[in-house]
Amino acid sequence: MTVLTKESIQELLQKNDKAVAHALVVLFKNQTATEQNSESTINRNGEGFRPAHARVGTSMANFYMSRNFLTPKQVAYWRRPMKDGNSRIGIYWRQLIVAAKAKAKAAAASAKDASYAQYTGE
């Protein structure tokens, strides 16, 4: 099992275009419905996009969900460093680790259920 760290998430985001796209979808889904519809950040709860990224993040997440790709220019936007030196997408590493762990837990539970069903013939 891969250990998820800030560094491993940020490295993946720098090397894998699909990881950037999937990260945008995770962040979009972490927004409330109101925030998604208004393309803004209303609740300062550490979930979803930061206020500066809400409009463009929502737009690009919707673009990816409807077309199943991001353009090279869109990916480059998220990888570009901000004034503090961190990439725009890399700053969301905490939320991405939480999402990855939840996905792994759900997959393990699903595999356990499938194994049980196979064993019992259900």
Image (cartoon, rainbow, N blue to C red):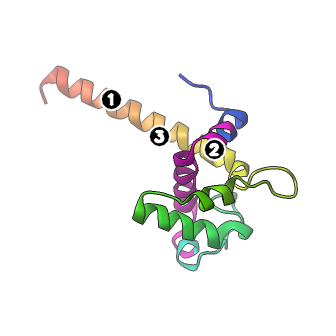
Q: Main secondary structure of the magenta part?
A: helix
Q: Residues within 10 Å of mark 1 (few under 14, many from 20)?
A: few
What residue is shown at x 72% (from left), y 34% (from top)?
A: 7
Type of the residue with mark 3: Lys
Type of the residue with mark 1: Ala
Type of the residue with mark 2: Leu
* Residue 57 in the image: above or below residue 6: below
Magenta residue check for 76? no
Residue 117, position as x, y percentages in the image:
20, 28
What residue is shown at x 66% (from left), y 62% (from top)?
A: 49
Magenta residue check for 26? yes
Question: What's the CA distance linking mark 3 and mark 2?
Answer: 18 Å
Q: Which residue is tagged 3? A: 103
What residue is shown at x 48% (from left), y 67% (from top)?
A: 63
Q: Which residue is tagged 1? A: 111
Magenta-tinted stretch: 11-34
Q: Residues within 10 Å of mark 2 (few under 14, many from 20)?
A: many
Which comes sooner in the sequence, label 3 or label 1? 3
What residue is shown at x 67% (from left), y 71% (from top)?
A: 41
